Image (tube, rainbow, N blue to C red):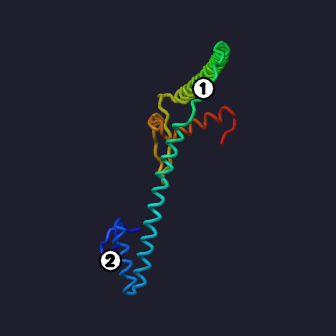
Amino acid sequence: MFNCVDAIGLPLDDGQKLQELLDDSDFYGTAKLSNYLRQLIADKVETETLRLKRIEEQKQAEKDEEEEEVVEIEPVDEQANKKRDEEWMQKFSEMTLQQTKNANKYFEEKKSQLDQKKQELEDAKKEIFSKSEDKRFIVRLNVGGRDYDADLAILVKHKESIFVKAFEKLGEAEKSKNYF
């Protein structure tokens, strides 16, 4: 809804002037303006009624809060609570120790697997280079119909090289004796 009657610039808060304007519009027979003003007045009355009702509810809620009685909690046996707390802490510490042991065991297994894999790759690398007399292993690549000779050490120099991945797969195939 608007904050004022746009056609005449009259603020909505001024209920008396709205009523006078309604009387004048009824006198001159302007039905649309009369209906609009009646609606504005009804909305204003409804809004004011809701506002007063909310204020009354807030006052009633504050009054109810003041009247509420304080409920006292019965004392609890502290010895029983301490005993339960100690039992829980004991179970928790046992559980934590077991989980720590399991985690350490898992990490040690993974570390040994990684060390073993690293050793296997080093052995495979030594084997490849030991086959070459001059410690260089030349690989011939066919690129677009042309042959290029490249040193293997240059091709596997970077970890992200496709040749590193290919040699890893070749190593896996060697383990299972399942060549391409």
Picture disc at residue 7: 2
Q: Is residue 125 left or right of residue 79?
A: left
Give the quadrant of residue 102: top right
Whichever of callouts 2 and 1 sits on the residue coming sooner in the sequence is 2
Instruction: Assign a secondary structure to mark 1.
Output: loop
> What percent of the width, then of the height, locates residue 101?
63, 18
User: Which of label 2 and label 1 is nearer to you?
Assistant: 1
* Looking at the image, residue 35 lies above or below residue 82: below
> Which residue type does callout 2 highlight?
Ala
Picture disc at residue 138: none
Residue beneath the point at 66% across and 16% down: 77
Instruction: Assign a secondary structure to mark 2.
Output: loop
Is residue 101 shown to the viewer in this render?
Answer: no
> What percent of the width, then of the height, locates residue 112?
60, 21
Give the quadrant of residue 109: top right
* Looking at the image, residue 78 lies above or below residue 130: above
> What percent of the width, then of the height, locates residue 24?
35, 81
Residue beneath the point at 36% across and 72% down: 18
Quadrant into which the N terminus falls: bottom left
- Residue receiving disc 1: 72
